[in-house]
Image (cartoon, rainbow, N blue to C red):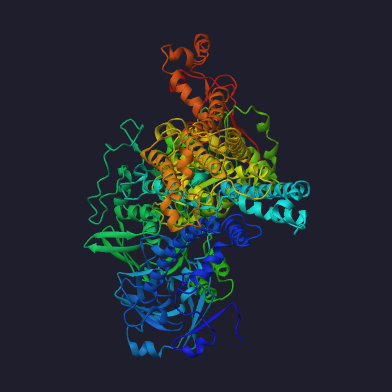
Amino acid sequence: CYKKEERHVRANDRDYNERFSYADNHIKTAKYNVFTFLPINLFEQFQRFANAYFLVLLILQLIPEISSLSWFTTIVPLVLVLAITAVKDATDDYFRHKSDQQVNTRLQNEKWMNVRVGDIIKLENNQFVADLLLLSSSEPYGLCYIETAELDGETNLKVRQALTVTSDLGDDVAKLADFNGEVICEPPNNKLDKFTGTLFWKDNKYPLDNEKMLLRGCVLRNTEWCFGLVIFAGLQTKLMQNCGRTKFKRTSIDKLMNTLVLWIFGFLICMGIILAIGNTIWEQKVGSNFWEYLQWKELTISAVFSGFLTFWSYVIILNTVVPISLYVSVEVLRLGHSYFINWDRRMYYSRKATPAEARTTTLNEELGQVEFIFSDKTGTLTQNIMVFNKCSINGKTYGDVYDEFGHKVDITEKTPCVDFSFNPLMDRKFRFHDSSLVEAIKLEEPLVQEFFRLLALCHTIMPEERNEGELVYQAQSPDEGALVTAARNFGFVFRSRTPETITLYEMGQAVTYQLLAILDFNNVRKRMSVIVRNPKGQLKLYSKGADTILFDRLDPSNEELMFTTSEHLNEFAGEGLRTLALAYKDLDEDVFDEWMKKLLFASTALENREEKLGALYEEIEQGMMLLGATAIEDKLQEGVPETIACLTLANIKIWVLTGDKLETAMNIGYSCNMLRDDMNEVFIISGHTMVETELYSSDSVFEETIIAEYALIINGHSLAHALEADLEQILVDVACLCKTVICCRVTPLQKALVVELIKRHKRAVTLAIGDGANDVSMIKTAHIGVGISGQEGMQAVLASDYSFAQFRYLQRLLLVHGRWSYHRMCNFLCYFFYKNFAFTLVHFWYGFLCGFSAQTVYDQWFITLFNIVYTSLPVLAMGLFDQDVNEQYSLRYPNLYRPGQLNQLFNKRKFFTCTLQGVCTSFILFFIPYGAFMSAVRDDGAHISDQQAFAVTIATSLVIVVSAQIGLDTNYWTAVNHFFIWGSLAVYFAILFAMHSDGIFTIFPNQFPFIGTARNSLNQKIVWLVILLTTVVCIMPMVAVRFIKADLYPTHTDKNFRRVRRTSSRRSAYAFAHQQGYGELITSGKNMKIPTASTSTYPLSSPARGNSVVKNSVVSGTTDAAETNSTGFRRESDQNQEVTVEDLEAR
């Protein structure tokens, strides 16, 4: 009896493994085949409301009693829409078939799809198959190197190692064929970084973890061959388990469109009911008078039943008010907007040859409506290229440069670097300026040497020596690479590793350490340790990690050193540096042996293995001795402060969510201009309990004027409490009153929870941007996810909707592409609904004058071609190319972005406005020709008011009116717009005359019976005068309304351009723009520095920012110090502070 949560795999025993019905290795990602494509694709398409609705209409049109339109008026647009969608789906599936075929026929000796669970297979360099347990390899100690770019986007090599007992099998086929070990492990799951299992072989059991697995998707590198046991195959591999459906994101316009289409359908039903009632009444009161004329002896059907049939007839005739082509047109526009983003050369990062990429086509217009941006810090605002900058060793700091008078000197590119020529294995790119650290190394100070020895040993880096002395480190994180490179230059060179040893070159001497255990880093532990035995036989534990974590595990004798090091850490963090604390411990042999027995037992446990290992790690990492701390610099990306300033002017709130220390986050905030010295208040929330956090809700910030500027900085502990149900509304209210919000020491889950909080309470469009795996959760949670293709792999990019290489491109993505997309989509929708209502409601008015008989005004072919030929291209051209202002003005005036945030350009009110315009246009289109033709005659005196001439006049007027209207709606004319508008008019007249010609009547006499109607109508002056009058009456009111509205209710664009025009005035811009000055302050003498003035200091302030977080620090008389309460909450005020001349000059 086997547990369902366990998987049993026996090597080289297919009969045994087939009992469990494990998936084979055949991969199928395609949805269709030749036989199933048509039925499945049509089934999927008819699940859309619009398609299903028109299918029902088509069926109704086949019933002669209710249909006055031929079936082709509906089937032509329906088939066109279905065909376009089907071609797109078929193309996508064709590429999936090709990919499946390539995968399933891979490998030389055996096809990929024939591989089964339990098989032992040989992989060669650059190959991968399924999820394998590594058994042996061509490298010593059963090592092999893999690249996991397809799994996590990281291109650096990683190492995997076989068990010692299986690595001895080598490439001996006979031994491998006799291998009969059984693996009991976890069931299939999507956790790429975790594997739990045990190998049972020869009456022994061996623990298995992720370091012994080769997953499908990783590629064998720098390894000639390896053998592996297939554990998971096909759809059960971890890669395929991660290929679940991504959460479907829909824009607010999408949701509104669906609502409006339902409203339009309801409006159609109402019109049908009105006309059906009219038919019933007409039949009762008027229709009976025609019985004798129709030679009816009795009424064949009742008036009520006639009304019932008329209802369905009008549902068919008025069906074009529900826009079948709307969704296809919208997708075409979105696709075009996506290509514009991909083709934007100003978002192309030439250093890495990385273009911007729209990874989805469904969210473009929402880029023009963003109100909140949630940004990671490291690698997003900063470069994530780490440089070892400073360190603290045994209470002494290194890294600063001083002049001969003992004053600190700013380090520039001209500052001389330390000479590392004593070290032949140095990295020539490494730069350090404090020579005292090299002197301490040369003097063989024990703690300094132990410091760099720890950096050289405590890591998971793989070295690659391409030539003699040319070392390349394959690091899993830039921080780790920077620390090991620093140790290398200071004489402790990490040279090579095996599963059991690490070899260093210490000041030129080769020293090999026995590696006994690696206590790896994770998000909970926030530290990493190694246990080694040095050549003298001493056991050492070396650990590095977050200072808040490591300090809790130090020996009590370190209290004084810990206090000094904490001050240094605060100083480093205040300068925006990333910090780590370092500690070590001497281990007793007996204690270690006992601990190793516990570790072996825990590592083979199938249940709660991670928890048991964590408890053991915690046990041995106690009572450590502090060595010091490191400080690594991560510089801001180019253009970050300018981008943030510009987006802030667009009324976009930017929140930074980072795992860094509070001081580091604050300093980055100042560097980015998110925090400024002239802010009214900077609130810092650093409580650790629910009570402490709850006190903040009573703050007087709600009573302050909304004009003031605040900043809120909150740590992870406080955030955890603030996100609880009782306080989350208060958190939202306080945070949204603040100009800047920075959340520090937060976990990836907390990042996602903050985004979800704003989505739920503010109903605003959110955008999350990040570059690492820890940002994936918030990227997927936000309405729009943006990935930075940076130093931390491609996981964020793979989970994102848009990606590019630099944070500064976000400004262009939102203010140019996003704003244009929103503007174009809204104009397109307004015009589309207007056009359809103007076209369709002519039938409604005609119904009152034709006895509600469900006859059409237009020719059937005109009804068929109006939306798909005569008016489709001009509106698409406007939707693709229109610009109210060019890109330079979009960036120069960020407040032009505001209408999208307020949803001003397309909403329910706009919809009613444009549909009302369409209704009025249809009324004018019908009744002006109707009134004119009541008494009109031809040039020869003959009567002109036949039904077909009437139809041609209205149809021609309609095409001209909607073409003129789109001309008015177009702000930016291109050659394409001209070609499509004038071309559509030309095509209309060409088809019109062709359908009424003698030739086509000869070929299709039943379909085109009205010979010469077009030429006989349009050669009359009266007809053209009616068309002209109708066009003028339809268009001129809109021109007048827009002219008056632009003057009385100007848009944001109008206001800005008026301001631009005014700035050209010859009047003094200084006199009109200058604010009240500081004349009275200067003459009073109060601003002058007084030698006896005291400087106020704030306990937890940033050293880099002077003595306070809000830096107006010179105070005379009483000092308005920061108020600090027991909760850890600080309120810093700039009241009662004097302003110096230097401050005035700075302002």
Residue at horizontal 43 percent and vertical 73 percent from the top: 213
Q: Nearer the viewer, residue 468 or 831?
A: 831
Using the image, determine if residue 515 lies above or below residue 827. Answer: below
x%, y% of residue 233? 46, 77
Count all numbered tags in the image, as a single digit: 0
x%, y% of residue 539? 43, 67
x%, y% of residue 357? 40, 51
Using the image, determine if residue 223 lies above or below residue 411. Answer: below
Residue that protrudes farthest toward the top in the picture: 1083
Q: Check the picture and name the quadrant holding the N terminus.
A: bottom right
Q: Nearer the viewer, residue 342 or 1089?
A: 342
Residue at horizontal 59 percent and vertical 32 percent from the top: 935
| Left or right placement of residue 347 versus residue 553 in this view | left
Q: Is residue 641 visible?
A: yes
| Left or right placement of residue 165 versus residue 1039 in this view | left
Q: Nearer the viewer, residue 423 or 462?
A: 462
x%, y% of residue 751? 56, 50
| Left or right placement of residue 288 versus residue 147 in this view | right
Determine the image quadrant of residue 116. bottom left
| Left or right placement of residue 455 versus residue 428 in this view | right
Using the image, determine if residue 292 lies above or below residue 540. Answer: above
